[in-house]
Amino acid sequence: MTSASTYDSSSAVAEFYDCVALYAERGDIEFYVAEARASAGLVLELGCGTGRILIPAARAGAEVVGLDLSENMLERCRVKLASENVSVIGRVGLVPSSMVNFSLGRKFSLITIPFRGFQHLVETSDQLECLDAVARHLSPGGRLILDCFQVKPEAMHHPAWQDEKEDSPETLLPDGRALRRTSRIAAFHRERQVNDIEMVWYVTHADGVKERLVWRVPLRYFFRYEVEHLLARAGLRLTAVYGNFDCSPLAADSPEMIFVAEKPA
Ligand SMILES: C[S@@+](CC[C@H](N)C(=O)[O-])C[C@H]1O[C@@H](n2cnc3c(N)ncnc32)[C@H](O)[C@@H]1O
């Protein structure tokens, strides 16, 4: 089980998370907010991070609990939340915890694990513990929605993926710093379905001083039927698999694998 968050190993991760242009283009906020609005009860977001999805869901009227292991990510979320109106703030609860084996003493009608949070659980035992905890926290008929990327074959082994590629072009921050980000696969571990991902932030301060901040994180990749089996082992019934946030069916070239499962009534 994870005890400390890899997200807190570099302060750059939480500080710059909401500046990554790539994240704004995902189209997942609208999807998850619509699902939160459509569910008639409490919503739990596992790995809520800085509130990128959680805060818009609360703005749309959902009562949401956000759980995250990273103190830095939760702190960003608290700061952002503080500038919302009182009714939005009143609809949000934040819980510092691992998504592996949590116990909140409440039931939820919707539990989400957006933006690949489940892929941080590298060990099968942690994935199953997490899904068991999800099943315990769902009301009968309640749903789980989680997304993973659909891994490209070259991303499992091709040396070209080890080269740094810019994924966020230079942006000027309000305090005068310029920021750009690259990412690469630092190591392949095919036998464990794990890639070590390296993200590098290039920061140029207003006085011209330059910094290169590196963060490395292991990420598990899944195949469709593996996730379907994991869900079944937790007693959850699969109701849909999408290939993108427009709810199109999963296809060979889909970038995402979005699983919707329900706890039988
Ligand atoms: C890619 S971010 C997604 C954040 C947010 N859901 C979003 O869509 O922007 C993944 C989040 O999962 C959290 N996380 C990773 N491992 C976790 C664990 N074992 N338990 C709880 N949260 C975890 C990280 O701290 C991070 O905030």
Image (spheres, rainbow, N blue to C red):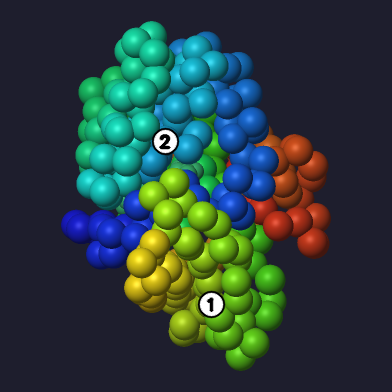
Q: Secondary structure at mark 1?
A: strand
Q: Secondary structure at mark 2?
A: loop
Q: Amino acid at mark 1?
A: Arg
Q: Are marks 2 and 1 in contact (CB under 8 Å)?
A: no
Query: On screen, 232 above or below 45?
Result: below
Image location of residue 218, percent across then percent down: 40, 70
Which residue corresponds to the image point at 64% horizontal and 67% vertical from the top-left?
151
Mark 1 crowd level (few <14, some 14–19, many ≥20, 10 Å Cα): many
Image location of residue 209, percent across then percent down: 35, 73
Which residue corresponds to the image point at 46% horizontal and 51% vertical from the top-left?
173
Question: On the picture, is 250 further left or further right than 94?
Answer: right
- Nearest the viewer among 22 and 31 is 22
Question: On the picture, is 202 further left or further right than 151?
Answer: left
Question: On the picture, is 19 further left or further right than 159?
Answer: left
Q: Amino acid at mark 2?
A: Gly
Q: Which residue is mark 1?
A: 184
Q: Earlier in the sequence, mark 2 or mark 1?
A: 2
Which residue corresponds to the image point at 36% horizontal and 67% vertical from the top-left?
207
- Nearest the viewer among 81 and 42 is 81
Q: Which residue is mark 2?
A: 51
From where the camera sits, is residue 227 visible?
no
Which residue corresponds to the image point at 61% horizontal and 90% vertical from the top-left?
159
Residue 158, label in figure: none
Name, please, the residue furthest toward the front.
207
Q: Is label 2 within 8 A of ligand 1 (CB to nearest ligand atom)?
A: yes
Query: On screen, 44 above or below 102?
Result: above
Mark 2 crowd level (few <14, some 14–19, many ≥20, 10 Å Cα): many
Q: Is label 1 within 8 A of ligand 1 (CB to nearest ligand atom)?
A: no
